[in-house]
């Protein structure tokens, strides 16, 4: 999968690149408006990460250019701007998702996964992972042809892991994903443990391949 | 509205009072002038009567006895004329006077005023004292008539004032009201300046221009503040995002001990808090700038229940 990272903060862009490379994403970088314009003109990407505040121009114009050229690349806006108006504007112009900085890399990865799947598979969006069959639109999961009932949060968690295969995901990242913004107002993130425990149990009962691993009690990993 | 009254009612009150004063003053003035004119007329009249009498008697060429009886007859018949013989030593210059006395013939009217002339005439070479008195219009009647007419005109004036006041006020306040309405419906958030209707009135044009400048300034300050708080917040985001990304990457390292992993993981909580605080500050400043238009009452118990 080809990813274009349009971000002027080099450190951040490089880190994203590193994180994504583990998941077989091929990332390219653009640090300025002009660089970005060049890249999108020449190449096609599965997903573009777009920062709005670029030196040399407004990121929104890149998005508009993509739409003008009728490109099908998925676009996730990553921006420091967090207001509702900015989000709405971005989505209206045609972005597929909007993620406000600062974010966990795991969250970014999960969203990229989601956008790409939507773009590529649309309605027949079914993920096959060995004995697991996940029907995204229907929000159901079948293990060894046996359907399991997962709660919304558990299903969400499962997708989150699948979007971050073989990466250690911190409890913090999981907590923020599950509870949204208010995770930082909680004293600890132990509630994550409860959900993970339930998910593990349900999957184990159905006989899955034990991919969900606990790492040192501080995080989890979907090893597959 | 309390003690406030409409602006144009104030000059109206002043005008009415002034009119009242002037018209009230006019009554005695009229009275005095009319009286004065009337007196002069009467004096003239009395003088003519005197000349006529003197002339007439002289022309008749009467004898002494005839003259006396004529005089007696005249005194009897002609009200207001009285002739009596005088001797030359008594001759004095003319004198004019006013006197009031009871009306013999009309007891209903209490008193009459008379304008009199005392003079000396010569008939057949002999001096005679002639008193001529002519009735003056009654004081009361003149005064009452003048007063009634004046009051009548005063009422017409007041009625006119009030009507004109009402009519003019509708017209005159139009540009002011238009300005006031535009002002009321102005929204600082919309960031567009106010447009005032042009009026032909100098004071309102001045008001409008000053207001416009004030609002422009206001909008620019508001914009600046908004931009400032947004920029500050955005600048903070980037280093935070970088830190977060380093933590996420660090956790991937499989040579970390359990203790080390726990410590790195622990960084997430305060980091999130910083981000949260920054978001709250931005939100607070937006609320204070009243960037949010709608205010809704929130039922706290419902929200709590929903969350649980």
Image: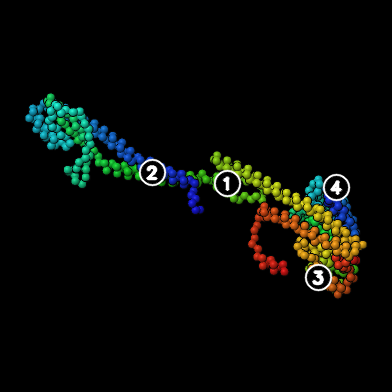
Which sits in the foreground, A30 or B297? B297
Which residue does the image show at 77% across and 57% down from the upper left?
A: B274
Q: Which residue is mark 3?
A: A194
Crowd band around label 4 with a 10 angstrom C-alpha radius: few (<14), some (14–19), many (20+)? few
Which residue is found at the position 13% from the left and 35% from the top?
B75
From this viewpoint, is residue A142 visible?
Answer: no
Identify residue for label 4.
A35
Residue that label 1 marks: B179
Looking at marks 2 and 1 on the same chain, the residue that comes earlier in the sequence is marked by 2
Above or below: residue B164 compared with residue B115: below
Q: Nearer the viewer, residue B36 or B59?
A: B36
Callouts 3 and 4 in the same chain? yes
Q: Name the residue located 18 percent from the left edge and 30 percent from the top edge.
A: B119
Along the polypeptide, which appears first: circle 3 or circle 4? 4
Mark 2, chain letter?
B
Q: Name the outermost residue toward the left.
A: B65
């Amino acid at each position: 999968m080809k990813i274009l990272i349009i971000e002027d903060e080099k450190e951040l862009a490089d880190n994203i690149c590193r994180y994504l490379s583990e998941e077989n994403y091929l990332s390219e970088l653009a640090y300025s408006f002009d660089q970005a314009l060049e890249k999108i003109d020449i190449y096609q990407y599965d997903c573009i990460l777009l920062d709005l505040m670029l030196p040399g121009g407004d990121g929104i114009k890149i998005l508009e250019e993509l739409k003008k050229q009728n490109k099908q690349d998925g676009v996730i806006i990553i921006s420091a701007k967090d207001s509702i108006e900015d989000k709405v504007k971005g989505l209206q112009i045609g972005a597929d998702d909007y993620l406000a900085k600062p974010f966990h890399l795991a969250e970014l990865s999960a969203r990229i996964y989601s956008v790409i799947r939507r773009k590529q598979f649309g309605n027949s969006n079914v993920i096959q992972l060995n004995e697991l069959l996940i029907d995204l639109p229907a929000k159901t999961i079948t293990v060894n042809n046996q359907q399991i009932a997962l709660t919304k949060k558990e299903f969400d968690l499962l997708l989150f892991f699948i979007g971050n295969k073989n990466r250690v995901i911190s409890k913090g990242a999981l907590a923020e994903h599950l509870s949204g913004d208010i995770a930082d107002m909680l004293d600890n993130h132990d509630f994550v443990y409860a959900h993970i425990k339930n998910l593990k149990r349900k999957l184990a009962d159905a006989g899955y391949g034990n991919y969900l691993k606990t790492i040192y009690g501080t995080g989890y990993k979907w090893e597959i | 509205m309390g003690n406030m009254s409409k602006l144009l009612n104030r000059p109206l009150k002043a005008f009415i009072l002034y009119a009242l004063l002037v018209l009230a003053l006019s009554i005695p003035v009229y009275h005095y002038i009319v009286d004065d004119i009337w007196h002069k007329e009467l004096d003239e009249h009395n003088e003519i009567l005197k000349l006529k009498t003197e002339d007439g008697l002289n022309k008749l060429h009467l004898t002494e006895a005839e003259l006396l009886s004529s005089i007696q007859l005249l005194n009897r018949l002609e009200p207001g004329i009285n002739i009596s013989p005088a001797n030359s030593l008594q001759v004095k210059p003319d004198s004019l006077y006013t006197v009031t006395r009871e009306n013999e013939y009309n007891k209903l009217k209490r008193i009459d005023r008379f304008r009199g002339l005392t003079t000396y005439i010569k008939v057949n070479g002999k001096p005679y004292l002639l008193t001529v008195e002519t009735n003056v219009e009654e004081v009361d009647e003149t005064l009452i008539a003048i007063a009634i007419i004046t009051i009548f005109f005063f009422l017409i004036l007041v009625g006119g004032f009030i009507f004109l006041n009402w009519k003019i006020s509708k017209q005159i306040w139009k540009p002011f009201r238009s300005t006031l309405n535009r002002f009321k419906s102005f929204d600082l958030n919309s960031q567009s300046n106010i447009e005032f209707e042009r009026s032909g009135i100098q004071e309102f044009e001045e008001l409008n221009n000053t207001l416009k400048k004030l609002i422009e300034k206001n909008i620019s300050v508001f914009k600046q503040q908004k931009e400032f708080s947004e920029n500050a917040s955005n600048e903070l985001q980037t280093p935070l995002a970088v830190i977060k990304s380093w933590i996420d990457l660090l956790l991937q390292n499989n040579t970390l001990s359990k203790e080390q992993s726990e410590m790195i993981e622990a960084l997430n909580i305060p980091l999130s808090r910083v981000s949260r605080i920054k978001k709250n500050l931005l939100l607070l400043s937006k609320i204070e700038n009243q960037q949010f238009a709608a205010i809704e009452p929130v039922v706290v118990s419902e929200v709590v229940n929903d969350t649980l």
